Amino acid sequence: MFSPDGNLYKTMSTLFDILVIGIMWFLACLPLVTIGAATTAAYYTMSKTVRFKTGYLFRGFWHSFKTNVKQSLIPTFIFLIVIFVLILDIYYVWNNRSKLNDSLFIILAGVSFLFLACVCYFAPFLSRFTKKNYQLFKMSAYAAFRFLPITVAILLVFIIMVIGIWILPWAIVVFPGLYLYLLTFPMEYVMRRFMKRPEKGEPGYDAWYWGETNDETPAEDVTPLRIVRSDAAVSENTAENPGEGEQ
């Protein structure tokens, strides 16, 4: 039952790793402007170490955090400002009911959905692709609507998580890690649509993010950015961000 190869041991080990990543994410988010880098590092570690069982948890998290913290500062600051303004506006129109404000509430709800739909892809994309911020946001916006059912599901689970944390504040070190683990399943599917796996024997063919399924699914023509390669060593397109050789 408690054998390292047993299902119970593997399940408990996975849950422990999810909890640890959630705690590290919380600690790394404390300055607020580092939320983007923390989320990027948490997704990267959750995907590589927990989902695909490779690499090192602590080393991978903090390496990714340090690698992406500078690039993520400006978009994180912008995202926080926009979210703060949207929350204030929604709170105001909700507490000052009128026909005009009811219409404004619907508009604000729609704007919030569009904004969050794009933002939810940004950190995972930053963890995988070496691109400038405006390109990453362009990719995120494209993916949000190209894979709309997945986007809606991601946002629904996110809302449930936020409500859960509101009701149980202590869950802020549990639910984010669990959410990110669940996120790896649809997000890895989406990101593979932006990549083309190298031919067998070429650099990057055995990269960890292709998983154990030997997925030969070709990339769809879904991106205007011509992202076609998946290995950091060969091309600047679809280069994995955190530097695999160091982990």
Image (tube, helix red, strand yellow):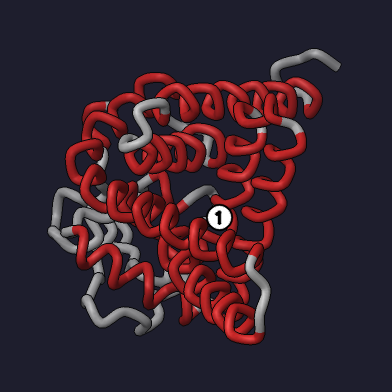
**Foreground: 90 or 181?**
90
**Foreground: 37 or 61?**
37
Residue, x 59% and y 78% (percent of image)? 101
Tell me the residue that label 1 is attached to. Answer: 213
Residue, x 42% and y 67% (percent of image)? 118
Q: Quadrant of the N terminus?
A: top right
**Foreground: 32 or 187?**
32
Q: Is residue 35 left or right of residue 104?
A: left
Q: Quadrant of the C terminus?
A: top left
Mark 1: few/some/many CA within 10 Å (<14, 14-19, 20+): few
Q: How many marks?
A: 1
Q: Is residue 158 left or right of residue 189?
A: right
Estimate the x, y position of residue 176 in percent, counting from the top left.
59, 38
Q: Is residue 125 left or right of residue 9?
A: left
Estimate the x, y position of residue 83 in percent, counting from the top left.
44, 56
Residue, x 25% and y 71% (percent of image)? 228
Q: Is residue 44 above or below residue 116?
A: above
Estimate the x, y position of residue 30 in percent, counting from the top left.
41, 26
Asked if one can make out residue 45 in the rendered structure from this viewpoint, the answer is: yes
Estimate the x, y position of residue 165 in percent, counting from the top left.
68, 38
Q: Label 1, secondary structure: give it.
A: loop
Residue, x 47% and y 80% (percent of image)? 145
The quarter of the picture where residue 178 lies is: top right
Q: Is residue 68 above or below residue 87?
A: above
Q: State the residue lying farthest toward the top.
A: 2
Asked if one can make out residue 243 in the rendered structure from this viewpoint, the answer is: no
- Looking at numbered disc 1 in the image, what kind of residue is underneath it? Thr
The quarter of the picture where residue 157 lies is: bottom right
